[in-house]
Amino acid sequence: MAREFQRGHKARISDLTLGTDLYVGVQISAPGLTFDISCFGLDADERLSDDRYFIFFNQPKSPEESIQLLGAQAGDTESFRVTLDRIPSQVRKLSFTATVDGAGQMSQIGPGYLRIVAGGEEVARYSFDGSEFSTERAVMLGDFYFKDGWRFAAVGQGFDGGLEALLKNFGGEVLEEEAPAAPQQPQPGAAPGFAPPAGAAPPAFAAPAAAPPAAPPAF
């Protein structure tokens, strides 16, 4: 049974699961709004010292593929694969964030969550809704951080700016305006073995999962 987290709660990941190959799913929605869901791989100073560890729709994996963007599946708006024992030593925190793409604010969102799945079983869930926020356009949802081993913290902290402001907050560089590149799409595939079953019924407030494509990912 999944352990329920409230904002500010923390736990050793080893107390949740002995697995190191984890699925992180985020469900967030609001009428008429779309969201960018990202992961920032930060150093000991909580800075993005290497832009290759900003994982988002245009950069769906880190160099060694320890952090991968998987796309929407199993009722989740966005999902990630995190392989803890492959994360390089200079990365000490993974910050999972959601930002409004365009106009809108976090107070408009319905009930959502960030969840951790290991071996196909949900082991942790942090639930939130718009009543916890006001005019913020971004939220830092949860962190994996290293302190005598990897731990999880439910954060739920609103942030006034959008994705660009969040990137600057973490010390990343915002590139000059160029012709927009076509977003890289995560490799298509059914939910992998460490993820929740694609047919699992999501909570009543979750958006229905899209039908999974046929071929599983290479990993």
Image (tube, grey):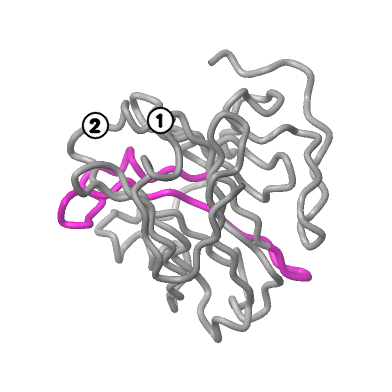
Secondary element under disc 1, as helix, strand or loop, is loop
Nearer mark to the viewer, of 1 and 2: 1
Picture coordinates of residue 189, whole percent (x, y): 69, 23
At 23% from the left edge and 46% from the top edge, which residue is drawn? 92
Nearest the camera: 58 or 139?
139
Image location (x, y in percent) of residue 33: 71, 67
Placement of 203 over or under 187, stated as above or below: below
Left or right? Give the position of 161 relative to 110.
left
Q: Is residue 17 magenta?
A: no
Q: Residue at x 44, y 32 (%)?
A: 61
Residue annotated with mark 2: 88
Query: Where on the picture, by quarter, is residue 140?
Result: bottom left
The relative height of residue 84 versus residue 219 in the rendered view (above or below) is: below
Q: Residue at x 57, y 13 (%)?
A: 218
The answer to whether residue 212 is above or below residue 24 is above
Give the side of residue 64 with respect to residue 21, left or right.
Answer: left
- Residue type highlighted by circle 2: Pro
Q: Secondary structure at mark 2?
A: loop
Q: Is residue 42 magenta?
A: yes
Q: The disc labelled 1 sits on which kind of residue?
A: Thr
Do tag 1 and tag 2 residues touch (Cβ < 8 Å)? Answer: no
The boundaries of the magenta stretch are 29-56
Q: Is residue 141 left or right of residue 109?
A: left
Q: Which residue is mark 1?
A: 20
Residue 101 on image: x %, y %: 60, 63
Task: Give the image quarter of residue 205.
Answer: bottom right
